[in-house]
């Protein structure tokens, strides 16, 4: 676990419950340190790329239409993200079908907080038409028209942590854009553009 010998010696003398609490506190500190180092590496990448990264040059902008969405939110770690996404998507599509709505629309996965070894707030959403009532932890809202900067994700970058390169590229693109700024949380859109399994997108300031 990378613990210093002196700390191990102190832990051995503790009661099991106290030892466990100490280990959890140590792990939280290490996790926070790694998160800060990861953010620093991403910042260095964006600063050093100078806009020359092919991913940055591939970023595009498109308009988004207004829509009604039904969504489920949850706090998850990166290890639990896939299971939560699959479960939430299945629940939403089942509810849409039960209510007589089209249930085959695109799914968006919003990241309202960073998701890594600590828990972050995410949201699985699917659009619908007509009227719909909340059910359980499924909620509804109106998504206004807007614009988004996006990148289709190639197979090389589909999995974590490689996909972070795509997020970094779009953020770097914003830094090099004089008249466009990001507004709100990033999200993934399934299916993606062309042959991509999904797109990564950032909303643009209205």
Image (cartoon, helix red, strand yellow):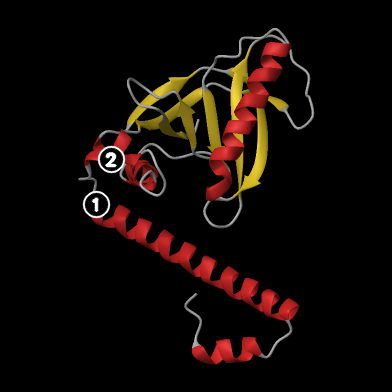
Residue 112 quadrant: top right
- Report the residue at 72% width, 12% height from top: 98
Badge 1 density bin: few <14, some 14–19, many ≥20, Cα 10 Å: few
Residue 41 vertical placement versus 190 (above, below): below
Is residue 12 rendered to the left or right of residue 1? right
Q: Are marks 2 and 1 in contact (CB under 8 Å)?
A: yes
- Measured in 3D between alpha carbons, the distance from the residue under mark 2 to the one under mark 1, in whole angstroms, is 9 Å
Residue name at image x 42 percent, y 46 percent:
160
How crowded pointer 2 is (Cα within 10 Å; few <14, some 14-19, many 20+) is rated as many
The spot of residue 78 in percent (x, y) is: 53, 49
**Label placed on residue 169:** none
Q: Mark 2 points at which residue?
A: 56
Tell me where residue 20 appears, x and y as whole percent.
Answer: 68, 75
| SS category of the residue bearing label 2 | helix
- Is residue 69 something one can see in this rendering? no
The x and y percentages for residue 195 are 32, 22
Q: In this view, does 45 lie above or below 179?
A: below
Against 92, is 104 above or below? above
Residue, x 66% and y 37% (percent of image)?
73
Pick the residue in front: 109 or 16. 16
Which residue is found at the position 53% from the left and 66% from the top? 31
Residue 7 appears in view: yes
Circle 1: element type = helix
Query: Residue 191's spot in the image, x, y percent?
Result: 44, 23
Residue 143 found in image quarter: top right
Q: Which of marks 2 and 1 is nearer the N terminus?
A: 1
**Near-viewer residue (117 or 5):** 5
Point out which mark residue 49 bears.
1
């Amino acid at each position: 676990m990378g613990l210093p010998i002196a700390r191990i010696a102190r832990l051995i003398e503790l009661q099991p419950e106290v030892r466990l609490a100490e280990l959890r506190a140590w792990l939280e500190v290490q996790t926070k340190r790694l998160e800060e180092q990861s953010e620093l590496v991403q910042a260095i990448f964006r600063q050093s790329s100078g806009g020359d990264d092919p991913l940055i040059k591939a970023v595009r902008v498109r308009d988004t239409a207004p829509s009604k969405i039904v969504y489920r939110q949850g706090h998850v770690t990166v290890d639990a993200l896939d299971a939560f996404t699959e479960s939430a998507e299945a629940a939403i599509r089942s509810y849409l079908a039960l209510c007589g709505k089209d249930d085959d629309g695109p799914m968006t996965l919003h990241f309202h907080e960073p998701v890594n070894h600590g828990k972050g707030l995410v949201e699985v959403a699917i659009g619908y038409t007509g009227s719909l009532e909340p059910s359980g932890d499924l909620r509804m809202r109106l998504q206004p028209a807007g614009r988004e900067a996006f990148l289709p994700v190639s197979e090389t970058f589909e999995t974590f942590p490689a996909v972070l390169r795509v997020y970094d590229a779009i953020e770097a693109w914003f830094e090099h854009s004089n008249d466009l700024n990001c507004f709100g949380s990033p999200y993934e859109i399934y299916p993606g553009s062309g042959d991509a399994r999904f797109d990564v997108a950032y909303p643009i300031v209205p």
